[in-house]
Amino acid sequence: MLSQSETPIHLLTKPSKTQLVDAFLGKSLDELRTPAMIIDRKLFAQNCASMHRKAREWGAPFRAHLKTHKTAEGTRLQLISEEDRTHAVVVSTMMEAWEVVKAGLAADSTVKDILYGLPVALNKVADLSALWNELEKYGGTVRLLVDHPDQVRFLEEYESLQEKPRRWSVFVKINGGQNRAGVVPQSAEFSALLEVLLKSPAVILYGFYGHAGNAYGSTSLSEASIFLSHEVESVNIAAKSALEMISSSYPGAVVSKPFVLSVGSTPTAHAASAETRKLLSEVLHGVLELHAGNYPMLDLQQQHTGMIDHARISQRVRATVISYYPGRGANGSDEAMVDAGAIAFSKDTGPSGSFGEVIGLPWTLSRISQEHGTLTSNDKKPTDNPLKLGTIVDIVGQHACLIAAAYPWYYIVDVDVEDGKKVVDVWVPWKGW
């Protein structure tokens, strides 16, 4: 059997939250070393409540993806809001999954259902099995994504060597045209995978999972709604095909009844509503589930979709102006240098073409190197309001998920506490794979 690997969570020493809170609680933001990542807890919580409300209006339970913030505190806000609560999550790494357990989120029943959000890696099956054992102590479960027959065959091989073999709950990952992971419904590859699944003693087919990553290119509610409808259509076609195959060839197959049809990305989840539910014309061959991950924090990419406005973005990066270059930019515009670059923002861009926008000032983060960034004045001439060296600016970047990955901790503010100008908490994110 293929060699197995373990999550080295016992070897990873994170910064101490207690020490960080002792050091920074009550400090003014101007006292913090830059670059610094700031999250407004109230906005974060409001965004979580809004998503719960949308899922309820759309008539579906919600599964929260933890990949953006990767913290225990953020997870609780994602799962329990003033609007609703859920116990189901998606993780993108095994470290996230084990940190959920280590944080006590399984023991206190905050999390009861963990979906490992990549097609199952064969060298992680033993680790996933150990995770499942841990969750079972608290009545929880682990689910997997599959999109290749050999993944199922390896699960069979693994379980055949266990003293008490069991069946894994699996989603089939559907490729709805994004060409990332997944199989195309009604394709030869899809049919071959279904046959292996329906005959397998090691799995239970739980449902079909789609993710409209291409919905990030939408610019309006109508466009996002089209992406959402296409997601539903793709997983629904897959479910119908599976039911037909079961009826004709595998009547004894062990499957979930009904299938779960899990769809979503932050843009399409924002489009979920009672109105968009009415637009679903086809008969559903399962029950819907909505999932998303970026929505608590948001960023310029999400703003460009037209589904949110700037006021809902809960994260930002503070940086300090360290030099100034009058007239150096295009058309004689001014430029300034800040102490935050590619490591602090990532090199992801978006439809707006920049790496970030300065909040409240007409400046754009137009170029970045490893540890510094170049701000360009939006004025097409020398500005009448130059940035002085030492000025601290707040910048919203393009992609919050990658930006957050750079920081060892996040400074938490609350707009209702000291107008959001002082640190009220510190969150330490989970690192590693």
Image: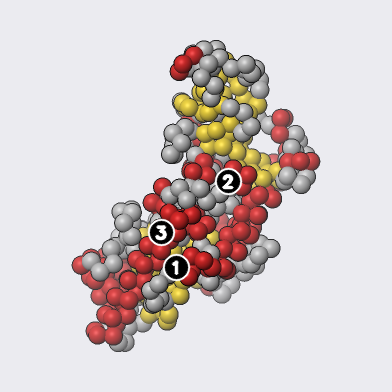
Three-letter code, disc 1: Leu
Name the disc covering residue 226, or none.
3
Left or right of 420, for residue 154: left
Three-letter code, disc 3: Ile
Where is mark 2, residue-wise?
309
Total marks drawn? 3
Give me the residue at 48% from left, 65% from top: 276
Crowd around label 3: few <14 · some 14–19 · many ≥20 (10 Å): some
Where is mark 1, residue-wise?
279
Asked if marks 2 and 3 touch (Cβ < 8 Å), the reply is: no
Left or right of 213, for residue 429: right
Query: Which image quarter is the N terminus in?
Result: bottom left
N-term mark: 2 or 3: 3
Q: Residue 324, relative to residue 177: is it above or below?
A: above
Using the image as rendered, state which of residue 267 and residue 391 is in the foreground.
Answer: 267
Percent coordinates x, y for residue 120 in the rendering: 37, 61
Q: Is residue 414 visible?
A: yes
Three-letter code, disc 2: Asp
